[in-house]
DNA sequence: ATGGTGGATTATCCA
């Protein structure tokens, strides 16, 4: 089974790219982030015509996550995280940043769009850390559900876990994505039992999944590795390959993120 | 130190 994750930065703006990507790489399951659309704004029939089932969880012009699968899509869940956007938010809105489902032969996949954090000291920075705690707790629950649970947490984690995951640490002084609390939050998910199952085959430095639109970051090879596939122990032992598709950052109409692809041996 | 780009919504907000 071939799964992929991609922060698409507007699904409406990149429908053609997504459909071409599914076909070119023979993708079974695709997790999307930053749909930037309400579900009712999306024309999902094009996926169905290509043989895929679709689930989306969208809310506003910034968030939204989706799962596209041609190997089944059941037990869809949207309740993570059960944390308000930020403490002073009176609306009580919970942003649409996580969508879980069971695909293939009992694999639980979560498409995740971790809050950006905005700036140090901003309420969204604390929100990001609280969100990570909710994610860690959910990850633990997944593993406890069954001793041999196969689960993947995929998406835009908005943290560069190691110094080599950004082009220049000096450029990130007093910036989000690299601070010790954010890295500890990411590591807490890893410590819960979820390993980065792509890094071993694609070690850094210089291996990135995101390049800012501004300042010619892509041609200057100044990127960040912030999109990951984290697999439970049962998944870790079933991985047969992985790939980061840098080609998708090229050309007109590219997202600022590229897809990360993982092959898993289907269980007995 | 600022602005640079891109997307959604419509003169800003967010990444």
Image: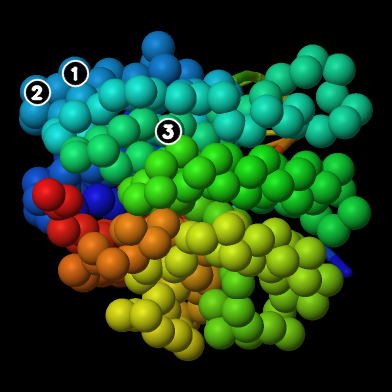
- What is the distance, in whole Å, between disc 1 and disc 2 at their CAs? 6 Å
Q: Quadrant of residue A69?
A: top left
Task: Determine which of the numbered discs, if any, sits on residue A22 in the image.
Answer: none
Q: Which residue lies most toward the front here? A: A147
Task: Quickly name the residue at label 1.
Answer: A45
- What is the distance, in whole Å, between disc 1 and disc 3 at their CAs? 21 Å
Q: Residue at x 58, y 58 (%)?
A: A192
Q: Residue at x 26, y 38 (%)?
A: A106
**Label 2: element kind:** helix
**Label 3: element kind:** strand
Q: Quadrant of residue A215?
A: bottom right
Task: Quickly name the residue at label 2.
Answer: A49
Asked if residue A207 is positioned above or below residue A115 in the image, the reply reads below
Disc 3 is attached to a residue of which chain? A
Q: Position of residue A15 (x, y in %)?
A: 26, 35
Q: On the rendered structure, is A57 left or right of A102?
A: right
Residue closest to the eye, A42 or A238: A238
Neighbourhood count class around disc 2 (C-alpha, 10 Å): few under 14, some 14–19, many 20 upward? few
Asked if badges 1 and 3 are on one and the same chain, I answer yes
Q: Position of residue A156 (x, y in %)?
A: 50, 52
Q: Residue at x 44, y 67 (%)?
A: A196
Residue closest to the eye, A196 or A91: A196
Asked if residue A193 is positioned above or below residue A80 in the image, the reply reads below
Q: Quadrant of residue A92?
A: top right
Q: Position of residue A239 (x, y in %)?
A: 24, 66
Q: Residue at x 21, y 70 (%)?
A: A241
């Amino acid at each position: 089974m071939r799964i992929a994750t991609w922060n698409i930065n507007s699904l409406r703006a990149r429908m053609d790219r997504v459909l071409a990507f599914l076909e070119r790489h023979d993708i079974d399951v695709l997790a999307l982030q930053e749909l930037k659309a309400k579900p009712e704004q999306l024309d999902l029939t094009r996926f169905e015509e290509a043989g895929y089932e679709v689930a989306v969880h969208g809310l506003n012009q910034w968030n939204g996550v989706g799962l596209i699968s041609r190997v089944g899509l059941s037990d869809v869940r949207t309740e993570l995280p059960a944390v308000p956007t930020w403490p002073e938010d009176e609306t009580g809105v919970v942003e649409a940043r996580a969508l879980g489902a069971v695909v293939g032969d009992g694999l639980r996949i979560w498409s995740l769009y971790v809050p950006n954090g905005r700036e140090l000291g901003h309420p969204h920075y604390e929100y990001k850390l609280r969100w990570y705690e909710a994610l860690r707790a959910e990850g633990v629950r997944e593993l406890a559900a069954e001793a041999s649970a196969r689960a993947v947490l995929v998406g835009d984690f908005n943290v560069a876990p190691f110094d080599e995951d950004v082009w220049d640490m000096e450029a990130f002084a007093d910036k989000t994505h690299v601070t010790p609390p954010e890295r500890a939050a990411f590591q807490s998910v890893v410590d819960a039992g979820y390993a980065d199952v792509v890094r071993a085959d694609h070690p850094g430095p210089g291996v990135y999944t995101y390049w800012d639109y501004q300042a010619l970051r892509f041609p200057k090879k100044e990127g960040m590795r912030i999109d990951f596939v984290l697999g439970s122990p049962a998944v870790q032992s079933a991985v047969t390959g992985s790939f980061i598709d840098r080609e998708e950052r090229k050309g007109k109409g590219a997202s600022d993120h590229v897809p990360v692809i993982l092959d898993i041996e289907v269980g007995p």
